[in-house]
Amino acid sequence: MFKKVLIANRGEIAVRIIRACREMGISTVAVYSDADRRSLHVALADEAYHIGGSAPAESYLNKERIIEAAKKSGAEAIHPGFGFLSENDSFADMCEKSGIVFIGPSPEAIRLMGDKITARKIAHDVKVPLVPGSDGAVSDVEASVIAAEIGYPVMIKASAGGGGKGMRLVRSKDDFESSLRMARSEARSAFGDDSVFVERFIERPRHIEIQIIADAEGNTLYLFERECSIQRRHQKVIEEAPSSAISSRTRKKMGEVAVRIAKAVKYKCAGTIEFIMDQSQNFYFLEMNTRVQVEHPVTEMITGFDIVKWMIRIAAGENLPFKQKNIVMKGHALECRVYAENPETNFLPSPGVIEYLRTPSGPGIRDDSSIYNGSEITPFYDPMLSKLVTWADTREAAIKKMESALREYIVLGVKTNIGFLIRTMGDDEFRKGKIDTGFIERHPELLKPSAAGTEKALIAAALSMSSSERTDTQSQKPASNWKLFGRRSGVSRSPSL
């Protein structure tokens, strides 16, 4: 097993990995930007190295600085978390050439599955269902012809990216040319590659993904599915496991298909195969994410399987000691992404300083977070504050527990989406499982608080704090909070690299 691991990330995922390493007896190394000097992941790690400016390109995307930090610290391995360099095959290559273990799949697997067109071809070769569309990147003329052949509505998608970038839904021929132009422009800006492909748009689809885990011997297991249909701007907001919409037969079929794809690229590590599913449980391959997912906690809650620890064990050379029949699921789990953003203004980020924070706790409640009283939410990174997760025996009970937990979640100083999440939990269609990727667009009323809105209840709860608590909170500054973390004696801090 590794003695020391560097975490090439920030925020809650860095904290999550640090805690997993600590439980495994592994020393940890954090890296941080100018904006993250007082971040929780820096405080919790055994060592921390400054790697550059606040902008990601100057720090968390700076491959050379991160490799240098790993070498200086003596870290044997690097865990990339999600985002940033987690699916960057050249970074995985650099790690290998530097004698550092990349806690993730091989560079080749990342390359193969990172390009949507190549991934689609691989899925086709192993007889995985695909949405009708182009077989690869297309010219403007080809795109128009294919769209007419498969019929509108169609989706135009960037070949080399994700997160909703370079993606356009086109419902008629009249809008196709302008949408194609915008998709190419956005893809070029986001990924440096304006190639796109076209596929049929599935009406009212559900977004279902299968978590897989594989070792170096080729043992590949699926850890059931997650439903991620509640999305805004093609980005997930609420996830759950299992899905309330699929049968045990469909679940088994999707799991087996996911394993086939992983085996086709000799995949090693944790990964996710994403599918789109229609109202008749017909499912089609979307893409593979070659990293740990933001929503991995819901899978952990229903299976008891620690995905992050097994990523580390597999990278260290361990093999999976169990078979598919040993993986069982119990109960139901929900995850709500708590963001510093304003749903009333199309979910615009809300940077600022957290003046007061109270998080929920109790049986079946998990809050993966990296914030504290005095944390600064900067405009440089994704504004996610935490991932609030609840588990219960049934979906209905998990929803009720989540609604209650959200009402206890108090954040002052920045706007949040907590009120929106509470209203979604109480929505009749959501409770009945009548959801799809267009759910938020169909329910604009969830974005605005009612006259007796939940925000009033949140504010009232915050104002009910004792006067002494408020005085202490308001007098605290990030620097004073920093002192509260209690550094271990002998821990080194490198001012810069």
Image (cartoon, helix red, strand yellow):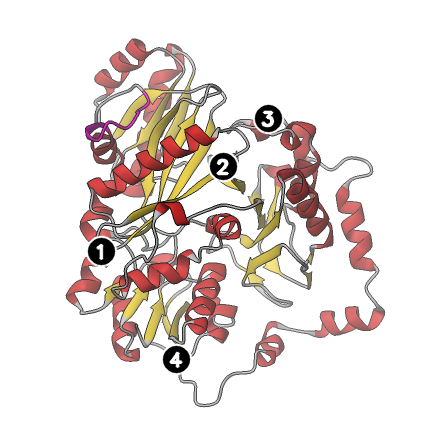
Q: In the image, residue 56 lies at what x, y percent?
A: 38, 58
Q: Earlier in the sequence, mark 2 or mark 4?
A: 2
**N-term mark: 1 or 4:** 1
State the residue position of label 1.
216
For the residues marked 1 and 3, what is the alpha-carbon distance in whole angstroms? 40 Å
Q: Dot 3 corresponds to which residue?
A: 434
> At 52% from the left edge and 83% from the top edge, which residue is drawn?
487
According to the image, label 4 marks what residue?
495
- Give the alpha-carbon distance from disc 2 to disc 1, as whole Å: 28 Å
Percent of width and height locating residue 376: 57, 63
Question: Dot 3: within a 10 Å radius of its alpha carbon, few (fewer than 14), some, or many (20 or more) residues?
Answer: few
User: Is 365 situated above or below 205?
Assistant: below
Q: Give the residue type at disc 1.
A: Ala
Does the image show residue 241?
A: yes
Element class at badge 3: loop
Gap in Å between the C-alphas at discs 2 and 3?
12 Å
Mark 2 residue type? Glu
In the image, the segment drawn in magenta is: 124-131
